[in-house]
Amino acid sequence: MPEVVKPCSLFRHDEDWDKRSSTTDGNDMPQMRVAVAGAGIAGLALAAALRRAGIDCHVYEQAEHLTEVGAGVQVAPNATRLLHQLGLRDRLRGVAVVPQAIEMRRWDDGRRLQRTPLGSLCRSRFGAPYYTMRRADLLTSLLSVVPPDRVHLGARLAAVTQSADEARLHLSDGPTVTADLVVGADGIHSIAREQIVADRPRPSGQTLYRGLVPVERVRFLLTEIRVQSWLGPDQHLVCYPVSSGRQVSFEATMSASDRREESWSARGDVAPLAAAYAGWHPDVTRVIDAAETITRSALHDRESIERLSSGRVAVIGDAAHPMAPIQAQGANQAIEDAVVLAACLADARPGDLSAALRRYEGIRLPRTTRIQQQSRANAETFHLVNGQARHRRDTSAQTASGLDRHEWLFGYDAEQATTTSGSA
Ligand SMILES: Cc1cc2nc3c(=O)[nH]c(=O)nc-3n(C[C@H](O)[C@H](O)[C@H](O)COP(=O)(O)OP(=O)(O)OC[C@H]3O[C@@H](n4cnc5c(N)ncnc54)[C@H](O)[C@@H]3O)c2cc1C
């Protein structure tokens, strides 16, 4: 039985919101109304950041419950520092795990290819911790800083339209919500993105399995608290502790070009996964065997885009730049997007939404495009079969250990980036 993250009310239209287009704040300034599609990490982070900036927003989520979705997530200092600024420092400390290192290992003999130290070294270098946690814990934490009446469940976006004066979010079997800005935080199959570019997600040819295992069943993994990535021909498995160390989250890829479905919650069978990993190192097969229930989804990809907005519609998170789950940065980048977009909107001159959105794109696109493209390139390297190329990968992985090469990624301060880019 999946755990419900938080009982939120089903969708109820806020009629005052529609009337607000003509209302003003105490300074006779029109109040900006932002409607967000999707209550994933991107949508909730944006709601939290907008609230902090004093901008009202409503979030519309298709799911009727926010359930235990997607097992674990790694949150690096570039995002934890932002989550702390959103007021979540204590809350995250209570649920997260601080891994001491990320290690990459060979699939068969378990030989260590690379070790990146984390723990206190990472925290002191970047001023914020590296965490692993359940996705549900991250979502609940974000929800705790968003007013419950601003998150509407069972509200599925069917289409977005816009005019020069307003954007409209059309909900299936529901009313149309009018806003000054619609933000698509609706994931890789984003409907809002259609306002910006006419592309489609394409299947990557990989199926992904994810699971949570009680720690008692896999104690052998915890001789050190760490993230372990096992690399093998055409597939890889990553595992790490979550839930204050009570559970281990794992994700394992498998070639399966026939699977088109993508979902965080479709049930998967352990048997085909176990068969695909037969012959791998015993630490890997024991993790898979220890799984009771797992979820399965088909991985998709999209090309990088040159704009993150069009008119009164913008996109953030996977709706903007889905990433192969190799660098563990998709959610981190979604949080960066949210903080930057909120800051750009807060600084916007009244009526000049377009300058704010240009500024958001100018800050975000170079970084997210670089990470998106690097993730795709690394996906190929991760899955090399035996041979010269794999030998070169293994040798260069060993020489590239350490935190230096993560400076540009973990050391980046998105809030600072909005200050140095100047305001609208
Ligand atoms: C196996 C795997 C492991 C990963 N590990 C990491 C990691 O360790 N660290 C990391 O930073 N990133 C990781 N990522 C990437 C990360 O999960 C995503 O980048 C992140 O979840 C994106 O968040 P999002 O809110 O943009 O999209 P999503 O998480 O997809 O959320 C979109 C939300 O919008 C809702 N929605 C969709 N369509 C509609 C609609 N029409 N109307 C209303 N609501 C809608 C959905 O129900 C959902 O709640 C991983 C990804 C995978 C696949």
Image: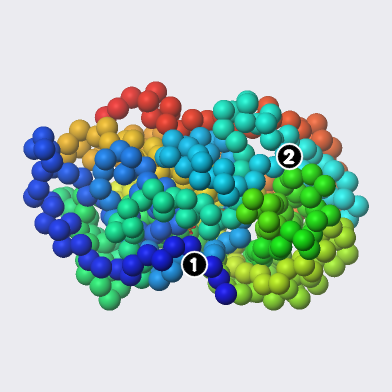
Q: Position of residue 289 (x, y in %)?
A: 79, 69
Q: Please tell me whether mark 2 sits on a helix, a strand or a loop.
A: strand
Residue linked to disc 1: 4
The quarter of the picture where residue 10 lies is bottom left
The residue under label 2 is which amino acid type?
Ala
Please tell me which residue lies in front, 388 or 3: 3
The residue under label 1 is which amino acid type?
Val
Residue at 26%, 62% in the rendered image: 169
Name the side, left or right, on which 98 lies relative to 309: right
Q: Which mark is residue 416?
A: none
Residue at 88%, 46% in the rendered image: 111
Name the side, left or right, on which 232 lies relative to 333: right
Q: Are marks 2 and 1 in contact (CB under 8 Å)?
A: no
How many C-alpha atoms fall within 10 Å of the one at disc 1: few (<14), some, or many (≥20)?
some
Residue at 20%, 62% in the rendered image: 14
Please tell me which residue lies in front, 326 or 79: 79
Residue 393 shows in the view: no
State whether residue 273 is above or below residue 302: below
How many C-alpha atoms fall within 10 Å of the one at disc 2: few (<14), some, or many (≥20)?
many
Residue linked to disc 2: 101
Q: Position of residue 108 (x, y in %)?
A: 88, 55
State whether residue 24 is above or below residue 174: above
Q: Quadrant of the N terminus?
A: bottom right
Please tell me which residue lies in front, 407 or 397: 407
Q: CA distance from mark 2 to mark 1?
A: 31 Å
Q: Position of residue 198 (x, y in %)?
A: 39, 58
Residue at 62%, 69% in the rendered image: 295
